Each structure stands twice: as C-alpha cells, then as structure tokens.
Amino acid sequence: MKSIKQFPFAHKLVFAALVMSALLASYAAFGGITAYASSVPAEPTIEVVVAPQVAEEARKPEANLPYLFAVFIITWALMFGYVFYMSRRQRTLRNEIEALKSVLNEKQGVAGKPARAEVEVQS
Amino acid sequence: MTEMAAPSSATKPATKGRGLFRDGLMVVSAALMAVTLWMIFFYVPTEANLGVSQRIFYFHVPLGWLGMLSIVIVAFAALMHLKTQNPKWDALAYSAAEFGVIFATLIIVTGAIWAKPVWGVWWTWDAKLTTTLILWFIYVSYLMLRAYGPKGSQGSRYSSVLALIGAIDAPIIYLATVWWRTAHPELVIGPSAESGGLESRMQLAFLISVITFTVMYAYLLWERYSLRRQEDALDEVHQTVSLRA
C-alpha cells in the first residue's frame, strides 16, 4: 500500500475538495437560504454606517448575493492558490533532493564507497 | 564527500505522532469548515439593515483576526530569533509573514466588497482601512526584504527588526475605531469589544467561524513551516556540496 507520504499534497487536495464541495453545496441551496432568511425577522446586529442611497437596496434579502458570492470565491481562490504554491515548492524540493542524491551516489560510487544518500523529508 | 544521514529510528515515533496530529488538524478544520458554511448560509438569520451582505462578516472578521494573529506571531518569532539566533524562529516568522500577506489581502478585498453595497464605495480613507493597508505594506516589505535584501543571517536579522517595528501597527488597527471617528463597525472581538452586540445565533456562528479559521490557520502554518525548514536544510546541503566539490 502506498503511503500518503508518497503523495505529499494528496491529503491537502482532499481537504481542498471537501471545503469546495461544502461551499458549492451551500451556494446551490441559496434559494432556500433567502426564503428562510426573509421569513425570520432579525434584529439589527452591528452598528454600521449605511449610505442613504443604498440603504433601501441593502435591505432586500437577495440584493447583494453577487457581493457575497464574490467574497467566498475570492477567499477560496486565494487560499487554494497558496496551497498549490506550497505544493509546487514541495515538488521542486523533492526533485532537488533526488538530483542531489543521484550526484552523491555517482560520486561515492566512483570513490569505491557504498552509495548512501538520504535526506529526511517530512510530508 | 557529503553523506546525508538517514532519519534516525529513534525519531520516527515522534515524527509519526506529529504527522497524525497534523492530519487530525486537517480533518478537524475541514469538518469545522463544513459546519461553518452550513451555519453561515442556513442557520443565521439575515440582518435587518444590511441584508445578505452581512454574511460576509463571518468570513471578513475571522480573516482580520488571522491577519492580526500573523503579525503577532511574526513579531514574537522575530524577537526570539534576534535573542537566540535559532533559525527555527526565523522560519516561523517567514511562514507567518506569508500567511500575513494572504490574510491582509483578503481582509482588504472582502472589506472592499462589503463596503460597496453598504457604504456605496469600494474604498474610503477611513482610519481602520488605512491602517490595515499599512499592515499589508509591512508584510510585503518584510517578504521583499527577505527576497532581495542581504542573504543569510544578516538578512534575517534585518527582517526581524522590520517585523518588530511593523507589529506596532497591530494595536493601532485594533483600536482605530476607538481612537478615531470612523465608518467601520465597532469592535466585536477582543478585550475592547462590546458584549451583547450580536443576536445569539449570529454570535454562535461567528464564534464557530473564528475557531474554524484558527484551526485551519494552525494546520496551514504548520505545513508552511515544515516546508520552510526543508528549504533551509536543502540550502545548507547545497552549500556544503558546492564547498566540498
């Protein structure tokens, strides 16, 4: 059985997929959300200065859905982008380690010593 | 010729334990995120004045908390690095600074998106917003100094000093709404926050959201820190190999 250490970012991708699916499922059910929300009278919560020209518009439950959607998309896009950046860095490190190993093994082989080169890499 | 040692068998159980804990953090943060999203979209009522856009709050404020937490970690690690010269602290400071850039960017972007439907403008030179933008510049300058400044211990010392100076901005951001007249909402988190400002379901969803993001942050920071340590170790190996070649 292959260890997850052989796929250093596999578990991170699973994490990303879990979060994304939860997000999409939530967004897919948005119709239900606004219906539920409009049926529940809510108290004002935090004191926010609301511009008069946009106050009426803001009170409509469905008025600002694109803004909410944009926030979630941008947040997750940036987070996933960073996770992929880390993944690429990790892959580059592994390649460098492999290159170093082969150079060292080659040189040690020429010198007649037993080849042994290993670097501890945390997954 | 350099011979790199295989991992000691004595350290393997500890490494395995750490790996399990890290995987546990990942699972817990994923599960908590699912709960948080459910609460944000299905559990909390819609705020009467702000409408649906108020749900941005459950992402915006935890991201702000993590941006502040990052600068505190960067400053603490920088201080410890200056004191002990231990490269582990420097690696932690660097990792937290990278997350600081990401979270500071997200605070500004999500704040701007929220400001548009509520204030009618994407950006205003409000005290809270401006000091947060300054925090973003501090993080970016820290990383630029690491990338383009002196290499080695000198570079890490310079950036540690910069991180300590930058940390002064954290309490200024937090107390901006207290010290200055500002359009930004009052504090909802921390010692100076007004209690009882949120409806009970909103308060619970907010609390869960803050915990979720904090757990996820811990997991991601751990990953980045491990990666940074490996990068440092590999740099050392490269230097050794090039010196001996």
Image (cartoon, grey):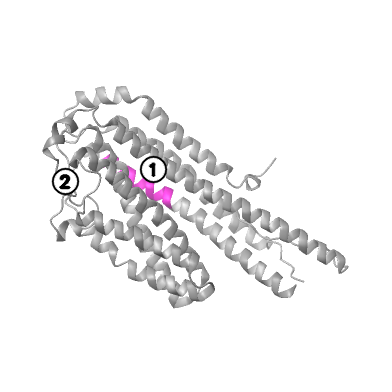
Please tell me which residue lies in front, B125 or A59: B125
Residue B89 x, y percent position in the rendering: 47, 68
Q: Which mark is residue B196?
A: 2
Q: Which residue lies furthest to the right in this view?
A: A112
Residue B39 x, y percent position in the rendering: 32, 34
C-beta proximity under 8 Å, tags 1 and 2: no
- Mark 2 falls on what kind of element? loop
Q: Mark 1 or 2, which is nearer the eye?
A: 1
Q: Which residues fall within the magenta stretch?
A: B204-217
Please tell me which residue lies in front, B94 or B25: B94
Task: Estimate how packed mark 1 is, as few (under 14), some (14 to 19) or many (20 or more) residues with alpha carbons within 10 Å.
Answer: many
Identified at 68% across, 63% down, the residue is B8
Quarter of the picture containing the N terminus of chain B is bottom right
Q: Is residue B200 visible?
A: yes
Q: Does B190 lie within the magenta span?
A: no
Q: Give the letter of the chain under mark 1.
A: A
Q: Mark 1 points at which residue?
A: A75
Write down the quadrant of residue A110 in the picture: bottom right
Identified at 16% across, 46% down, the residue is B196
- Mark 1 falls on what kind of element? helix
- Give me the C-alpha separation between circle 1 and circle 2: 28 Å
Residue B133 x, y percent position in the rendering: 30, 56
